[in-house]
Amino acid sequence: MNLLEMPEAQRTELQARSALAIDGRGQEVLLGMNAEESRFFIACMQQTPSRPAQRERYAELKVRHEAARLRLASVDDESTGDEEGPPHLAHKF
């Protein structure tokens, strides 16, 4: 497994937020990003980019990352795993 390089405090924070994953190649990535995007994003978290194009890319990746985290959270919250199919409604609204 190939881990992203980052300070331990940053890794702890990202792990607590369930923001890290392992891709199909065994590389640690941020949710919603590939390995190259993840490395760029981590670098930007440590030092805000000075060039406008880099700031825009960072902002776009942040939106994609948060959307991926929310999708994952909503999947986890939709079911306890004990249900058998959709709920049965006794009446119409």
Image: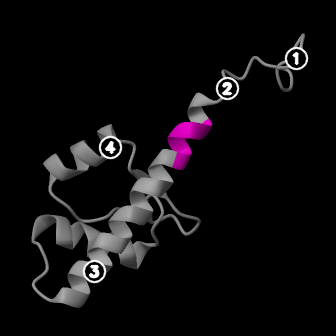
- Against 87, residue 68 (above or below) is below
Q: Is residue 17 left or right of residue 89?
A: left
The three-letter code of the residue at mark 2 reads Ser
- Against 44, residue 17 (above or below) is above
Q: Which residue is mark 3?
A: 56
- SS state under label 4: helix
The three-letter code of the residue at mark 1 reads His
Q: Nearer the viewer, mark 3 or mark 2?
A: 3
Q: Rounded to the nearest whole Å, what is the CA distance between mark 2 and mark 4? A: 23 Å
Q: In the rendered structure, which disc, 3 or 2, sits on the residue that comes first in sequence?
A: 3
Q: Which residue is mark 2?
A: 79
Q: Nearer the viewer, mark 3 or mark 4?
A: 3
Residue 19 lies, in percent from the top left, at: 38, 50
Q: In the rendered structure, which disc, 3 or 4, sits on the residue that comes first in sequence?
A: 4
Q: Rounded to the nearest whole Å, what is the CA distance between mark 4 and mark 1? A: 37 Å
The three-letter code of the residue at mark 4 reads Gln
Residue 18 lies, in percent from the top left, at: 39, 43
Asked whether 91 or 76 is in front, the reply is 91
Q: In the rendered structure, which disc, 2 or 1, sits on the residue that comes first in sequence?
A: 2
> Total number of numbered labels?
4
Near mark 2 (Cα within 10 A), the count class, few <14, some 14-19 or many ≥20, is few
Q: In the rendered structure, which disc, 4 or 1, sits on the residue that comes first in sequence?
A: 4
The residue lying at 59 percent from left, 65 percent from top is 24
Q: Nearer the viewer, mark 2 or mark 4?
A: 2
